[in-house]
């Protein structure tokens, strides 16, 4: 299994949603990877909500 790890501030300025959209597309090919976003949440839960909306909780 491959792991992708982001360590830094979870902020909308970082445009991490692009990573989450790419993950959603990658799931059509394989689920043999894991994505970890680590850092203080400066986006007031935006990325947490987006993960739930895109149904990426298990990735």
Image (cartoon, rainbow, N blue to C red):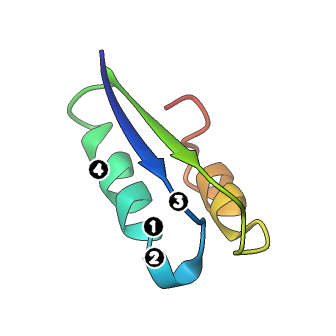
* Gap in angstroms between the C-alphas marked 4 and 2: 20 Å
Q: Earlier in the sequence, mark 4 or mark 2?
A: 2
Horizontally, residue 35 falls left or right of residue 10, namely left
Residue 19 figure quarter: bottom left
Q: Which residue is mark 4?
A: 25
* Helix, strand or loop under label 1: loop
Write down the residue under mark 2: 14
Q: Of circles 2 and 3, which is in front?
A: 3
Callout in the foreground (1, 4) = 1
Give me the residue at 43% from left, 56% from top. Answer: 20
Q: Residues within 10 Å of mark 4 (few under 14, many from 20)?
A: few
Q: CA distance from mark 4 to mark 3?
A: 23 Å
In space, the residues marked 1 and 2 are separated at their CA atoms by: 6 Å
Comparing 46 with 56, the one in front is: 46
Residue at mark 3: 8
The image quadrant of residue 31 is top left
Point out residue 59 in the picture as x, y percentages from the top left corner: 49, 32
Give the percent coordinates (x, y) of residue 53: 64, 57
The residue singled out by tag 1 in the image is 16
Outermost residue to the top: 1
Quadrant showing the N terminus: top left
């Amino acid at each position: 299994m491959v792991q992708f790890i982001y360590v830094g501030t979870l902020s909308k300025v970082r445009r991490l949603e692009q990573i989450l959209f790419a993950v959603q597309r990658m799931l059509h090919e394989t689920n043999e990877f894991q994505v970890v976003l680590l850092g203080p949440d400066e986006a007031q839960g935006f990325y947490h909500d987006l993960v739930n909306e895109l149904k990426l909780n298990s990735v």
